[in-house]
Amino acid sequence: MAGVISPAGNLPAALTSFVGRRGEVAGIRRLLGETRLLTLTGVGGLGKTRLALEAAGVSRKSFADGVWLVDLAPVQDPSEVAGTAARALGLPDLGPRPVLEQLTEHLAGRFALLVLDNCEHLVDACAELAGGLLSAAAEVRVLATSRQTLGITGEHVFTVPPLAPHEAAELLRDRTVAVRPGFEVTEANAAAVARLCAELDGMPLAIELAASRLRTLTVDQVAERLEDRFALLTGGSRVARPRQRTLRAAIEWSYELCVPAERLLWNRLSIFVGGFALDAVEEVCAGEGIAAHEVLDLLDRLVAQSVVLPADAEGVPRFRMLETIRQYGRERLVECGEEERLRERHRGFFLSLAELIADCWCGPGQQEALARLRAEHPNLLVALACGGDAQATLALAAALRFHWCAGGFLGEGRRQLERALAAAPEPTPARARALWVVAWVALLQGDLAPADRWLDEAAALGERLDDPVVRAYVQGMRGTSASFHDRPQEALPLHEAAAAAHLALGEGTGAILALFQLTLIQARLGIPDAAERGRRALALAEEYGDRWGRAHLLWALGVDAWARGGQEACTTLIRDALALARGFHDYVAVVLMLDLLAWTTAESGDHQRAARLLGAVRSLCQGIGTTTAAFGPHLTEEHALCEEAVVAALGPTAYEKALADGGRHDTPDAAIAYALGADTDAEPASPESAPSPLSQREREVASLVARGMTNPQIAGVLVLSPRTVGGHVQNILTKLGAGRRAEIAAWWTANQESDPVR
């Protein structure tokens, strides 16, 4: 085949500015220096083509024989793929040999980059083309864009993410100015812009279509109309391909490329919000067209096609769909008449999950269980709003009791329980259970009057139903209420009876909770064997593997030690309790533990740190809308004495400053980390005295960076490869403090502009 390749290539000139994605462009350039086939994947509308063209454009100098775009969107016949590539390079098809053979022969020995754009509907033919070119032309590189990978040896995959929030806002501003000159993102509309971009998943196509609507609508008006986003987001460029003119067309293109079983799973996955785990998909989406054993394979295929995205949360493997993709699937789910059935199956799955966690709470895996429920929180709210079977909803609200009480969702739990109780007034076992659970939530909020009313109803219903478990929990909760009302003598027999009842029933969770409360009351009353009995309860919790119960019991033993003047023992117990409480998000427990630690810290003379601990206590209390006064006068008095001592030692101004400093630790885990760690507000050690976190070689690299030497120069001085230098720099970025990190990062970013291929 005759012909000469122009070194210029054929990349089209951009009609609009390229906004954001500088990190992605740099990453693609770097990968093109390391691999010969790179595929950009992502669902339609994420900007794969524009990103590929930008990365290819800035890489021109690295490819002496040109950067060439092969646009495969109009091609429908797989046999035309090689010919389309040849025509894109300006090569005539004159010989009798197969086009691919002629093309690979011509590219042999040339240093060129081919951009194969829109491969998803021609994956097999594109894989054959790329494989043939890369085998025969050793200096050729291929950058492909496709909704799914090509699946050949040597392929590297770059999943195109949505735009970052600030990039999405800048794109909206840039495109809106074209139709509405003078538009700016200001303090007045910044929140609305952020909301709009978030609702559009940071999807460039959706944002550009929304910008066209800002010719006549305000940002708030566009955001309010997003419920029907597929009707709103139309009217794209007339010169764009049909599937790029409306959001619906872009998503329909992806949908039509799926086989029927994949479409069916897409529809059913739309029932989940905020992500989903494999076990949920297998339980909710299987049946009637999808066999249980097919679910995993179909889900994997949707991931490969970028319809579903991996989205691990707190170490739990999960998946998610962009909201636009989910809403399209939901429309199709409604059209096929499956929505109601899937909603019920969705609620059924989460009811089973919540009941399993509640029933098995007194044992190992508590933190993992709460992490799962936190990840599923959006799905839980949808399940609770399912409608239909009010008793099932009530059972779900009650089964989520540890999510509400130990997982940091007291306010949400109270709202959901009150709503479910109002919708299901029948005297059922589910109502009896929900009544003592909502009373527990209210007690933890310090709202005693409604808690007492619910406990009265729960007691009556427990007797009517002859439910010994309900009766035992009611006794324990009444003991807590009496304690908060400053009636410890009344609370003592209630907790004793509750503990005995739970132990007789073999109900470990209730038994340990009651024993914890009993230990606390005995310590408050100065009963001599409070710590003998508390440690037996602790041994029981250890036997069960109940980490949460152990944390509470250690706090109760700490209260007893404090009451007996054992300051050092109290501090040790509370630090152990806080270590166990990490990861639970239990605001109330951490508030009480930190408050006690502040008392011992002030007693030891470290008033500055005590004030910061009190600041963390105040911040956490504000997070759940309560104060330490809600947990009984006894604790309130000790808190006040501690505060008085700290103010007297520091003075009001210094106290308020320290209080504010401590208030920055406004989540349970952050506050625990502060309480157990070194004083993060202390002056940093001098460079001479602080041990270096870097290895000898990393220190050498850092020293040369500080002298302004470039990547190749460092490599030459230290006899290293540039890639090894890069590895050292990445380690330095991880290990050094924030100030030096910024310095090193700025240098490294500047030096990454060098040719990634050479």
Image (spheres, rainbow, N blue to C red):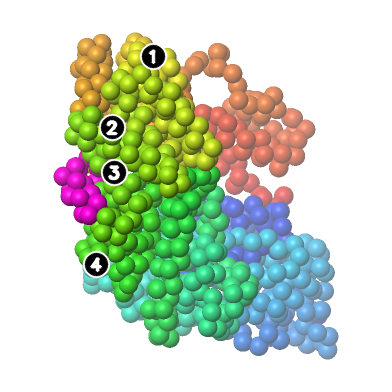
Asked whether the beta carbons under mark 1 and mark 3 sit within 8 Å of each other, the answer is no
Residue 529 % position (x, y): 39, 21
Callout in the foreground (1, 2)? 2
Q: Earlier in the sequence, mark 3 or mark 4?
A: 4
In what element is the residue under mark 2?
Answer: helix
Give the percent coordinates (x, y) of residue 594.
35, 28
Labels 2 and 3: the sequence-earlier one: 3
Q: How far apart are marks 1 and 3 (CA)?
A: 32 Å
Specify the principal SS of the magenta part. Answer: helix
**Residue 5 in picture, x, y percent from top left:** 72, 71
Q: Quick check: marks 1 and 2 in contact, CB under 8 Å?
A: no
Q: Disc 1 on helix, strand or loop?
A: loop
Tell me what residue is drawn at x 33 percent, y 46 percent: 472
Amino acid tagged 1: Gly
Q: Mark 3 points at which residue?
A: 475
> What mark, if any, has residue 566 been given in the picture?
1
Return the residue at label 4: 426
Which residue is painted at 22% across and 54% down in the image? 460
Q: Is residue 42 visible?
A: no
Instruction: Give the residue at mark 2.
Output: 492
Is 281 on the left-hand or right-hand side of 672? right
In the displayed structure, does residue 548 sit left or right of residue 218? right
Binning the other alpha carbons within 10 Å of mark 1 as few (below 14), some (14 to 19) or many (20 upward) gives: some
Instruction: Examine the image and state in which quarter residue 200 appears.
Output: bottom left
Q: Which amino acid does label 3 sit on?
A: Gln
Residue that appears at 43% across and 53% down: 358
